[in-house]
Amino acid sequence: MKKPSFFLLLTMGMLLLLSACGEKTPPAEIAGTESETVALTVWGAEEDEALLQEIFASFQSRYAGEASFRITFQPQSESNCKDILLGDLENGADVFAFADDQVAALAAAGGLDPIENAGEIRAANLSAAVDAASVGNTLYAYPLTADNGYFLYYNKAYFTQEDIQSLDRILAAAAEAGKLMTMDWSSAWYVYAFFGNTGLEVGLNEDGITNYCTWNSTDGPITGVDVAQAMLSAAASPGFASRTDTEFLEGVQNGSVIAGISGVWNAVAIQEAWGENAGAAKLPTYTCAGRQVQMASFSGCKLIGVNAYSQHPEWAARLAEWITSEENQRLRFQMRGQGPANINAAGSPEVQDSPAIAALLAQSEFSQLQRVGGKFWDPVTEFAGNCAQGNPSGASLQAQLDRMTEAVTAR
């Protein structure tokens, strides 16, 4: 009998090897293997880096053996995340934190896909946060916080409970102590506080892009000029300074600032600086057109989005869900003092007992969900910046209001 040739044996061996390999090939739906490297870029607030690194570590521990992860954090402001992301979607972050007023634009531009397990996410989070993360009835992002608003922080060593009810009293007490009360007039977000409860209006038109605005109105019990004069009066006080949020916190820490308007993201740092004297309350009233007007606020939520162009959409979605899980929203509150959107986390005793959260809830009666188009921000900031300087040119306030309103409502 003839022996099989070498080439025949080689051919048979190759066929057997291919057959064996075919039997062991995993099905396509199993995306993760130990040898696979999943690279994910995450954008978030610079102040959240330590928190997020801890969350990344627990995520990698949870999914150890399913894939090899390389998670990169990059600081990116939540307030303008949309603009940066839409500038280059394909090279943008896989997972990103952003303010809820950007969700409609991100979804319309194709930057966000609907959440697949929307029912689970809706059931786990506060209805207001779910609504903020939705466009119509479609959920496009994962709720992260339900606390994106602002209120008054004050040092109890300098103010009585009566003092903090009125901006006039707060400024007088600060001036008497040789200290400051601050507010960021370089941000239109905070400037809304003066206009919001006056009967003057701003908001989105039905097109979802352009704004309507009556802040220059000359009719009604309170006019635009009345509000502008009230702002100039506050700016003239030796107890007032327009400071950014970072400068406010620096002032708290060095002792020059004893009150200021900010949000829960500074709660932990303020508690560390002022200790048992750390106080928080709703915004005060201010004098306008001869009456006391309750200061208003914008409200909203922070969300986590998954880039529709991510190279690893399933893992990006898992990470987004992990960042916003009940456990990690509790951790966020402990480390950053931010109010959870998760129902169970928000209902916990430690959250309910937080002075900052209590102040935010008290202010919520006088707040409005932030829904303004992109042309709102710069004109209002320019107007308020001039007021903060005391209107040095002496230009007509009505003319400035007219110019601001025209720019805000431009199409």
Image (cartoon, helix red, strand yellow):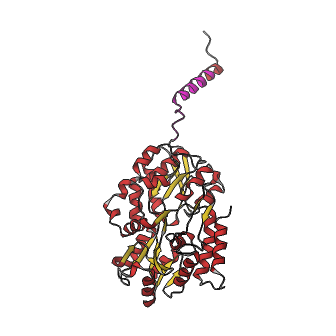
Q: Nearer the viewer, residue 389 or 328?
A: 389
Residue 411 coordinates in the image, percent (x, y): 68, 61
Q: Nearer the viewer, residue 257 or 7?
A: 257
* Quadrant in the picture for the N terminus: top right
Residue 176 vs 356, above or below: the answer is: below
Q: Main secondary structure of the magenta part?
A: helix
Q: Residue furthest left?
A: 349
Specify whether residue 99 is in view: no
Residue 7 vs 112, above or below: the answer is: above
Residue 39 coordinates in the image, percent (x, y): 56, 50
Q: Nearer the viewer, residue 312 or 143?
A: 143
Residue 79 coordinates in the image, percent (x, y): 56, 63
Residue 156 falls in which quadrant of the image? Answer: bottom left
58 part of magenta stretch: no
Specify whether residue 115 is in view: yes
Residue depicted at x 46% and y 79%? 291
Q: What residue span does the magenta drawing correspond to?
A: 11-31
Q: Residue furthest right?
A: 411
- Total labels: the figure holds 0
Residue depicted at x 53% and y 78%? 243
30 part of magenta stretch: yes
Q: Residue furthest front?
A: 220
Residue 358 coordinates in the image, percent (x, y): 37, 67
